[in-house]
Each structure stands twice: as C-alpha cells, then as structure tokens.
Amino acid sequence: SQLENKTKEKLQKKICQVVLDHFEKQYMVELGDTWTSVRDVLTYPLCWQYAILMNKFSPSAELESTLLEKGCHPAFQGPLPYLPASLKCYIRRTPGRFTAQKHQPGKLKEYYLLNAASLLPVLALEVKDGEDVLDLCAAPGGKSVALLQCAYPGQFHCNEYDELRSRWLKQTIESFIPDPLVNLIKVSKLDGRQIGDLKSESYDKVLVDAPCSNDRSWLFSSDIQQATLRLIQRKELSCLQFQLLRSAIKALRPGGSLVYSTCTLSKAENSDVINLILHSCSNVIPVDISEMAKALSQEFTFLTGTQQHELLVLPEKGRAWGPMYVAKLKKI
Ligand code: SAM
C-alpha cells in the first residue's frame, strides 16, 4: 500500500544528523529529560501510530466492525467539553500501518489517515452549525475534513497559499465531501497574511494551522543542504506565524475565536508567538482549554507546566501522537 511504502521509505531514509544535533541542543534546554523519550519516538518510525478518521458522508459499518475486531478503539471518549457524536476516529495502542484509500473520481473516501493529535485543534475550535469558519492554512486538508465531520458551518472558507498544495486541498475536499455541500466550500489561494484585510470581521471561528518546522518530517530530510537551509529559515517562521495570527484576528468578528496550532516542539514557534500576540493585540484574550487536555489525558501525553490556554502533545511509546501545539484565543 501507499502508506506502507511511505513508512518503508522513511525507514530506509536516514535520520538527518544536522537536524538531530540541532534538536538535541534546543530541546534539551526547553524540555530537559522529557526530550530524551520524545526523541526515541521521533527517531524510530516503527513505533509510529496512525489514527483513522471516519468520513460521516460515506459511512461504513463494515469498516467500523473490522477496526474493532482488529483491536482499535475510539480515540475520543468520555466527558469532553465538546465532542460531536459525528466525529469518529479510531486508534490502536500498538504501532501499525493502515492502507490509505486511493483517489477515485466520483467516489467518496470512507476514511482519512492522520496523527490523532491533529484532531485536537479541531476539537478546541468548537465549531457549531451555522458558524462562518476560515481555515487559513488548509492544505492538504485533513483538518478541513475533520471540521466538516463536526458541524455544518454557514460559510466554510479554506485557504492555501501554495499553488500545488492548493490543488491537493481541492482533491481532498472532493474526495470526502459530497454534493451539494462541497459547492458551498470556498477554496482560495491567498497569502493568509492578507485575508485579515480582505475579509475583515467576517468569521466566527478561524483555524491557523501554521506552517512550522514540522519536527517529525524534518528529522528525515534526505537532502542535507535543504535541511541546513531550513535551519536558517526556521528563525523566520515565528515572524510569519505572528503575521498569520494577526491576520486571523482581523478576520474574526468580535466575540469569535481562533485556534493556533503547529506540529513542532519549538517554543519560539509556539508559546513565544502566542505570548507576543497577547502582549501586542489588546483585542484578544486567552481561552482556557485545560479541561479538554484533562479529559484527553488517557490517550495523549501533554507537556506539564503550560498555561491554561495552550497544550503541547508529546509523542510517547504506545501514544506516539504529536508533536502538536494548540492555543486558543478569543477576540473581544
Ligand atoms: N491544516 C493542514 C491539514 O490539516 O491538512 C496542514 C497545514 S500545514 C501545517 C501549513 C500550510 O500553510 C502549508 O500547506 C503551507 O503551504 C501553508 N502556508 C504557508 N505560508 C502560507 C501563507 N502565507 N498563507 C497561507 N498558507 C500558507
């Protein structure tokens, strides 16, 4: 299968030593001993896990019973502050690979494979039916698909700046979302930094799943030159993330809220960016998401000592989800 091939490729590929050395230096300081166990998961793809997000628009009872027979269980259970019954995601404690479904024109896919932690920003956003929603950095579209499992937004605007990735996003949406709903989704190719001015005070909810260092894939870069260049570019990412957040705040209606997420452990791209926004924008306040983290602590490991408006999922053996940073803010 495609996914097995990808995993094999990852296993064949070597860890990029320049990147690992860089992580060792930075994350030993930022995370201390916790980094050692996180590193063991990130550098060993055989223990990686995949979650299966069911597509409510193409339900398959047969697939669900097969998953249960194979020892999978729902990723989200129990007293979560917001858990739409229509969001169904299965996980298994043991590492394993699932077959990815190929794109077949005219046929909806039954499931989407993802890192279970990717659903946390979606849950934190708490989208309700009828709300106007913007997914600012949307490709390849995993979170857009997940958002649509949770609710029927009024307006749903998915944006992706990169031309190629934008096509990928369109394909994902078409593979999972049926007519006529698919026609109500607006896909744009704008620089997310401009959307605040172009669509000022237009949305109730904005997801900023920001371009970031992506620690997991960066560690396996095959091109050392490219990986080294990214070390330099990494410093510029927090500036881009800050600008995307500022744009998202402009695009929000007063009373609306946004979720910021990344898949890096880096403090510079996570809490530092959020703290800078909180200090420089007087019209946003932090939103407490600690109840959500508490309710999810059986399946996910979180960094301790974070503030109430943020969480950081740390990959651990048997719960190899993340890294995923999530923060929630509200516009007043
Ligand atoms: N939300 C996606 C998902 O769940 O499938 C993943 C998004 S990925 C972390 C970040 C995306 O932001 C990348 O596809 C990248 O091309 C895009 N991006 C980078 N710069 C951007 C910008 N200025 N405006 C909008 N999108 C941008």
Image (cartoon, helix red, strand yellow):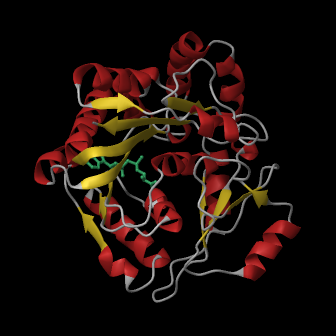
**Residue 59 in sight in this render:** yes
Residue closer to the observer: 175 or 5: 175
Q: Image point 81% across, 75% down: which residue?
A: 65
**Residue 162 vertical position relative to residue 322 in the rendered view, above or below:** below
Residue closer to the observer: 144 or 26: 144
**Residue 200 vertical position relative to residue 20 in the rendered view, above or below:** below
Most extreme residue toward the left, as rendered?
197
Residue 274 x %, y %: 37, 27
**Residue 161 in sight in this render:** no
Q: Image point 42% across, 72% down: which residue?
A: 173
Left or right: 95, with 112 as reference point: right
Left or right: 81, with 136 as reference point: right
Residue 218 x %, y %: 49, 37
- The image quadrant that residue 163 belongs to is bottom left
Residue closer to the observer: 223 or 155: 155
Residue 189 x %, y %: 22, 60
Q: Image point 53% across, 67% down: which residue?
A: 149
Residue 258 x %, y %: 36, 43
**Residue 319 vertical position relative to residue 305 in the rendered view, above or below:** below
In what quadrant of the picture does the C terminus appear?
top left
In what quadrant of the picture does the N terminus appear?
bottom right
- The image quadrant that residue 313 belongs to is top right
**Residue 322 vertical position relative to residue 142 in the rendered view, above or below:** above
Residue closer to the observer: 233 or 331: 331
Q: Image point 43% across, 70% down: which residue?
A: 152
